[in-house]
Image: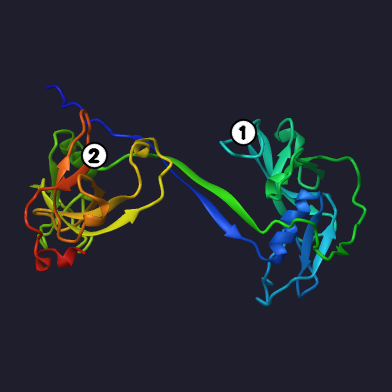
Amino acid sequence: MASAPSPEVLRAPLVVEFPFTRSLGPVQSAFLTGLRERTVLGVKAGDGRTLVPPVEYDPVTAEEIRDLVEVSSTGTVTTWAWNHEPRRGQPLETPFAWVLVKLDGADTGLLHALDAPGPDAVTTGMRVRIRWAAERSGAITDIACFEAYEGESGGAESAPHDGVFGDPVTGIVAPARLDYTYSPGRAQSDYLGALADRKVVGERCPSCHKVYVPPRGACPTCGVATTEAVEVGPRGTVTTYCIVNIKAKNAMNDAIEVPYVYAHIALDGADLALHARIAGIPYDQVRMGLRVEPVWSDGGRFPDHYRPTGEPDADYDTYKELV
């Protein structure tokens, strides 16, 4: 007897990316500006230790600390791990070691990359020095990496530093990015399969009888498995919305002009609102209670956007629990 074919396992690469922008206080500003000037600064804690990289508050007492000191650009590896396959955005493109380096004059370790020909060339206790980047802007990347150093520890002491530099760095933009592969479970796969047929299918909880779209395979309220498929919509009601004024760096959104509206939509027959873009109406005329329907693009696996149906607005009492 022939066995049934295994269902296709869906997978898709996903990327979450955004620029994280922050302003700098006097300690971090001095540290990053110092790196631009090939100077490594730490800070003196209340117990007399020199902390590198510096922090603004004492890790023991939580008191504010600002006593800056200069330490050496040479140091000792205290621990390490070999990175055999560098990833996008990492300090080196060839295999390297992640190392904690206690710089001469410091009492804590600085995490960075060590350029080495292989793991056999790296040892705890080895001497290293900073290799400065050719172009520096006031960022941790001004340290291109560490490299092996034949000199001995001179027992260097940290020296007081006023932290004053010309044109100080006052803020940074750090790109945050997460690359991963998403594989939906049974419920999500069924939902995506139905969308390919231009149907929206949720699942009903056997306990509270609510219909969830998109389905999760379990009721988030009752915690019981859901298996009963329920087709909902395709029309629905805008429960709440926001006006988007910043263009996303996304190929799918390149043709969408700002401002536009993104809304929570309660599809008819569903007990959970999903989110989608609203079009076919001026952004300043979108409102709570607006009745909408999906618009599919040619070959699209999901609605491109929702547009007004022309029906009267829904009464607030019919969707107030989904706002």
Q: Is residue 104 above or below residue 85?
A: below
Q: Quadrant of residue 26?
A: bottom right
Q: Is residue 12 left or right of residue 147?
A: left
Q: Is residue 229 left or right of residue 280?
A: left
Q: Quadrant of residue 212?
A: bottom left
Colour theme: rainbow
Q: Nearer the viewer, residue 132 or 255?
A: 255
Percent position (x, y) of residue 58? 69, 72
Percent position (x, y) of residue 61? 67, 77
Percent position (x, y) of residue 249? 43, 41
Q: Which residue is mark 1?
A: 84
Q: Nearer the viewer, mark 2 or mark 1?
A: 2
Q: Amino acid at mark 1?
A: His
Q: Amino acid at mark 2?
A: Asp
Task: Say which quadrant the C terminus sits in.
Answer: bottom left
Q: Residues within 10 Å of mark 1 (few under 14, many from 20)?
A: few
The residue under the point 58% across, 50% down is: 174
Q: Nearer the viewer, residue 162 or 79?
A: 162
Q: Could you tell which of marks 2 and 1 lies nearer the N-terminus?
A: 1
Q: Nearer the viewer, residue 165 or 217?
A: 165
Q: Which residue is mark 2?
A: 304
